[in-house]
């Protein structure tokens, strides 16, 4: 396992110093990533589907095998390689909206999760070891403002976080990673993700706000009000993707969005975890509609915003185990299924 920091350009991976003078160059770099995104190999998908049709049907496993064939795009169309090198990126980022009393997580829990994962002692670390997935936990820099009243970050910082996510995807592609598992965790992150899902799907705050396992009616109403106010602030920015991320996103969602776009540009498949990564996927899809073909919904959580996001993305989750915790465990459990599908499609 490895750890580190990302987001905001502070680790120097993207060369952006966060000044206004760098903003045009940063936007050009984001545009270059978007223009590089193409669909997975259709010929490989067709060849794999035709080959599988000649065998006894295995239901969803056949469908997943066809998907793997497309995203791998091997030299011989329709052939499938084993998914040997799978890496989970766990992005940890707290959100200032937790100060509104909407989070059941204690202060310091995100850093504790990252440290425990580095030490191999957290739930995602133990599950990852069991399914042969390497984990890279990243504690992103800074805590954002309360997005129901103030912008999460500046446009410059948002662009830097987007490019930091692209840099993470580039590093994985250069290392030969076969698939990325993307998870995001943090205090207040679920509330912000719910607001982003509501904005991008035009759903009411009450339809996307999580009740969670311990929220009473009063706390849920407070959370729904924060989601509503956040959505009201973000609605005028729906046509400005970077502006929307700046207003209601923050470094965690911006980095996740950049990673999803960068992975698609580098033709590297990504398994999404919960509502936070799915919210980032919704925005990334609006920025580059072809990118969604490179993503797979690993599981469906009981969070209402998660189902809303997956339905809009057109992604059918591999598993439905009602895993609520957003630490990558639900996504990791889908890896053996995907590997089995690839093995069956390869024979």
Image: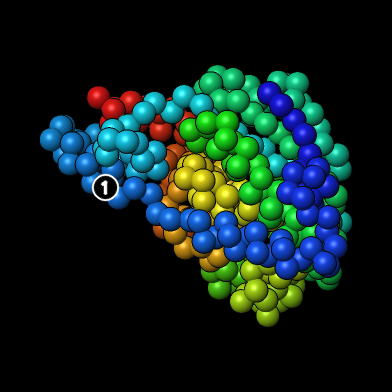
Query: In the rendered view, would you say 220 is above or below 149?
Result: above
Quadrant in which the N terminus appears: top right
Query: Which residue position is annotated with label 1?
Result: 43
**Residue ID at (79%, 59%):** 157
In this view, the residue in front, 206 or 91, is 91
Query: In the rendered view, would you say 326 is above or below 136?
Result: below
**Residue ID at (85%, 62%):** 19
At which x and y percent is residue 261?
Answer: 56, 53
Number of marks: 1
In this view, the residue in front, 173 or 194, is 173
**Residue ID at (57%, 68%):** 200
At which x and y percent is residue 215?
Answer: 72, 51
Left or right of 42 on screen, residue 10: right
Quarter of the image where one finds residue 101 = bottom right
Task: For mark 1, give the secondary structure.
Answer: helix
At which x and y percent is residue 225?
Answer: 74, 69
Quarter of the image where one finds residue 304 = bottom right
Disc 1 crowd rating (10 Å Cα; few below 14, some 14-19, many 20+) is some
Quadrant in which the C terminus appears: top left
Quarter of the image where one finds residue 202 = bottom right
Colour option used: rainbow
Query: In the rendered view, would you say 266 is above or below 129?
Result: below
**Furthest residue in direction left, as rendered:** 54
At which x and y percent is residue 268?
Answer: 49, 42
Residue 111 seen anywhere in this rendered image of the structure: yes
Residue 100 seen anywhere in this rendered image of the structure: no
**Residue ID at (68%, 65%):** 27
Left or right of 50 on screen, residue 323: right
In this view, the residue in front, 181 or 176, is 176
């Amino acid at each position: 396992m490895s750890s580190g920091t990302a987001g905001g350009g502070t680790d120097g991976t993207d060369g952006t110093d966060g000044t206004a003078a760098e903003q045009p160059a940063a936007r050009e770099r984001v545009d270059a990533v978007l223009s590089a995104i193409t669909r997975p190999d259709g010929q490989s998908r067709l060849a794999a589907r035709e080959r599988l049709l000649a065998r006894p049907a295995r239901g969803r496993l056949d469908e997943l095998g066809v998907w793997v064939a497309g995203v791998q795009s091997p030299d011989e169309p329709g052939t499938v390689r084993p998914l040997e090198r799978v890496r989970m990126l766990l992005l940890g980022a707290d959100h200032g909206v937790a100060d509104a009393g909407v989070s059941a997580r204690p202060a310091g829990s995100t850093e504790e999760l990252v440290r425990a994962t580095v030490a191999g002692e957290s739930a995602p670390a133990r599950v990852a070891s069991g399914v042969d997935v390497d984990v890279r936990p990243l504690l992103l820099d800074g805590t954002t403002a309360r997005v129901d009243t103030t912008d999460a970050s500046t446009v410059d910082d948002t662009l830097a976080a987007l490019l930091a996510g692209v840099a993470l995807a580039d590093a994985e592609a250069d290392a030969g990673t076969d698939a990325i598992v993307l998870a995001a965790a943090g205090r207040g992150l679920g509330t912000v993700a719910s607001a982003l899902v509501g904005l991008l799907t035009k759903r009411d705050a009450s339809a996307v706000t999580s009740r969670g396992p311990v929220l009473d009616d009063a706390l849920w109403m407070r959370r729904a009000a924060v989601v509503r106010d956040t959505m009201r602030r973000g609605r005028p920015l729906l046509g400005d993707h970077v502006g929307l991320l700046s207003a209601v996103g923050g470094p965690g969602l911006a980095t996740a969005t950049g990673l999803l776009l960068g992975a698609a540009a580098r033709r590297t498949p990504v398994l999404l975890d919960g509502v936070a990564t799915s919210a980032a996927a919704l925005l990334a899809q609006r920025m580059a509609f072809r990118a969604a073909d490179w993503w797979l919904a690993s599981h469906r959580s009981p969070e209402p915003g998660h189902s809303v996001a997956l339905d809009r993305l057109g992604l059918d989750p591999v598993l439905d185990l009602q895993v609520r915790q957003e630490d990558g465990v639900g996504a990791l459990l889908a890896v053996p299924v995907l590997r089995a599908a690839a093995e069956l499609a390869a024979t």
